[in-house]
Image (cartoon, rainbow, N blue to C red):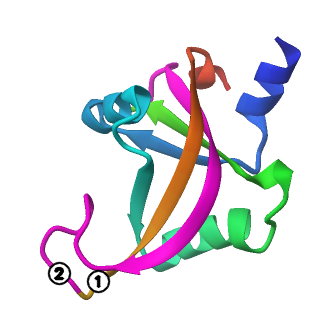
Amino acid sequence: MKNIIYELYKPRCLRLALKKEWYEKIKSGMKTTEYREVKPYWDKRIRTLYHYNNTPDFNKIIFSLGYTKKCLIAEITNITIESGLNDLNKTDPFKNTYAIHFKNVREYKTAGTF
């Protein structure tokens, strides 16, 4: 139990709140890439947590079902910048997005208790 709590509350994990549709697709394994627009907000979060600190302590992503206690934890395998159409960008083929690739998704029901 101590390892689970440490993993959930590590301050340097990338945390994302998702709508139920996307949460369920990740949970079922249908979705293995999460997209975020390349903007200053995401630059700061993603580059700080992953690109410049690419060590085992900084390779986790936590997806929460909205702001509930249910969450999924996965290992980040790669983060790339892609341009073109995808789940997030359905209209502008020249817009850049971060593509966060992940694997080994596990579900927990205690992430909201921080």
Q: Name the residue under label 2.
A: 92
Q: Seen from this angle, which residue lies furthest top?
A: 1
Q: Label 2 sits on what residue type?
A: Asp
Residue 30 percent across, percent down from the top left: 34, 37
The part of the chain drawn in magenta is 67-93
Q: Classify 89 as above or below 59.
A: below
Q: Quadrant of residue 34?
A: bottom left
Q: In which quarter of the image is residue 25?
A: top left
User: In the shown orientation, is residue 86 left or right of residue 27?
Assistant: left
Residue 66 percent across, percent down from the top left: 39, 32
Q: Classify 57 as above or below 35.
A: above
Q: Is residue 91 magenta?
A: yes
Rendered image: mark on residue 95: 1
Q: Residue at x 49, y 20 (%)?
A: 70
Q: Residue at x 60, y 38 (%)?
A: 74
Q: In which quarter of the image is the C terminus?
A: top right
Mark 2 burial class by Cα count in 10 Å: few <14, some 14-19, many 20+ = few
Q: How many labels does the image show?
A: 2
Q: Seen from this angle, which residue lies furthest left?
A: 91
Q: Label 1 sits on what residue type?
A: Lys
Badge 1 vs badge 2, beta-carbon distance below 8 Å: yes
Q: Which residue is drawn at 56% across and 75% down?
A: 43
Q: Does the magenta stretch include residue 86?
A: yes
Mark 1 and mark 2: Cα distance apart in space: 6 Å
Residue 68 percent across, percent down from the top left: 45, 22
Secondary structure under the numbered disc 1 in the rendered image: loop
